[in-house]
Image: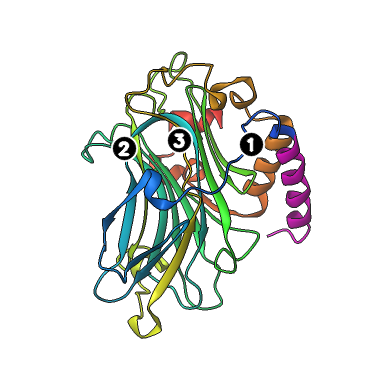
Amino acid sequence: MGSNACPWLLLVAVVLLLAVAGSAPVAAAEAAFDKNYVVQWGDDGYHLVIRGTEVNITMDQSSGAGFRSKSTYGSGFFHMRMKLPSGYTAGVVTTFYLISQPEDGSRDEVDFEFLGDKAGVPITLQTNVFVNGRGDREQRLHLWFDPAADFHDYKILWNPYQLVMFVDDTPIRVLRNLTATVPGYPFPAKQTMLIRASVWDGSGWATDGGRTKVDWSKGPFTAGYRGFDVSGCANGSATPCGSPDLWWNGGAYRNITAEQRAAYESVKKHYMNYDYCGDKARFNNSVPVECNYA
C-alpha cells in the first residue's frame, strides 16, 4: 500500500461529498430497522438483536443471522453503515448485498463481502457482480482504515447508466451499462433486487482459500448495522425505475466525475490486491468483455 494514499483519499472524499451535496435530498432522521427491513434468519433474540436504528448480528457455533428488505428495487442509491467483528475473525463473512429473486441460476447479485482473518491481519473486502447467474467477477482490497474499529458507510449506486460501489464517498468499483452498444456486455438491468445483510461461517473458502477456519473459542463474533433508510425505486412504484425524475437517475449520477475517477484509480493502485480482470490465466489468456471498458 502507498503510505501517502490515505490522506489524499480523505481529501477527495470531502470534495466529492461537497460536489454532490446539492443533488441528493437532505437526509432525514435515521429510520428504524422495522420500517424497511425484516429478519430473515437467526431471529431468536440473541443472534440478531434490534435496537431501533441499530442491529447487532452475532455468530457463534450454533448460528449466524441475516436480514432483508421488505421490498425489491429496480434502481436506487443503497447504503448500509457497518462495524465489523474484531480480533481473530478468520472464516467469518460479513455481508451487505443486492440479490434478485428467485435465487437460482439466472439471478443478479451485487456483493460487499468482508472476509475475516487472523488477529493483526487486515480484513479483506471482496466485491462481486453476478449477471444472469454468472459471477466470477471478484475484486479484493484491504481498506485504508480498520473496518472493525468504527462504523463506515458502504454504498451501491445502481441505475440504468452505471453500477458504482462506494466505501464512504470513495468509489471502489465501477461498471457502466454498455449493453446497448457492446455485444455480450454484462449489466444487472432486467431484474429487481432485494437488499440483504448477514454474518455467516465461510470457513470453506473465506480465509487463505479455506485453509484457516473459524476458531469458535475466539467468538462470538458480532457486527453492527445502521442506516435503514432506503433511497430506491420499490417494485410496484408508480414512477418507472428508470425515470430521470428519481434523483439517483439524474445527470449527476450517470457517470462518475473526474475527481471520483481519480479516487477510484488510486484505490486500484494502492489497495486492490486481486482483480479478476488482471487474471488472464483464469480466462484462457483473455479477459471478460467488460474488462476492456473498466
Which mark sits nearer the N-terminus, 2 or 1? 1
Q: Amino acid at mark 3?
A: Val
- Picture coordinates of residue 144, whole percent (x, y): 65, 59
Residue drawn at 56 percent across, 77 percent down: 120
- Image quadrant in which you'd find residue 173: top right
User: Marks 2 and 1: CB-CB under 8 Å?
Assistant: no
Residue 65 sits above or below residue 121 on the image: above
Query: Is the residue marked by circle 3 packed among few (<14), some (14-19), or many (20+) residues within 10 Å?
Result: some
> Do residues under tags 3 and 2 come within 8 Å of each other at their CB atoms?
no
Task: Give the Cα distance between marks 1 and 3.
Answer: 41 Å
Label 3 and label 2: CA atoms lie apart by 15 Å
Question: For this rendering, which residue is in front, 223 or 95?
Answer: 223
Badge nearest the viewer, 2 or 1: 1
In the image, 106 versus 55, the foreground residue is 55
Q: Residue at x 57, y 46 (%)?
A: 29
Q: Is residue 149 magenta?
A: no
Farthest residue toward the top?
Answer: 181
Specify whether 13 is left or right of 115: right
Label 3: which secondary element = loop
Q: Which residues are magenta?
A: 1-18
Q: Which residue is mark 3?
A: 287
Between 80 and 255, which is closer to the camera in this rendering?
A: 80
Q: Identity of the amino acid at label 2?
A: Arg
Q: Which mark is residue 134?
A: 2
State which tag comes first along the sequence, 1 or 3.
1
Q: Position of residue 14 (x, y in %)?
A: 75, 45
Q: CA distance from mark 2 to mark 1?
A: 37 Å
Q: Which residue is mark 1?
A: 26
Does residue 61 sit above or below 75 in this rendering? below
Q: For the residues carrying marks 3 and 2, which lies nearer the camera in this image?
A: 2
* Mark 1 residue element: loop
Question: Considering depth in this image, is 201 or 17 the residue closer to the camera?
Answer: 17
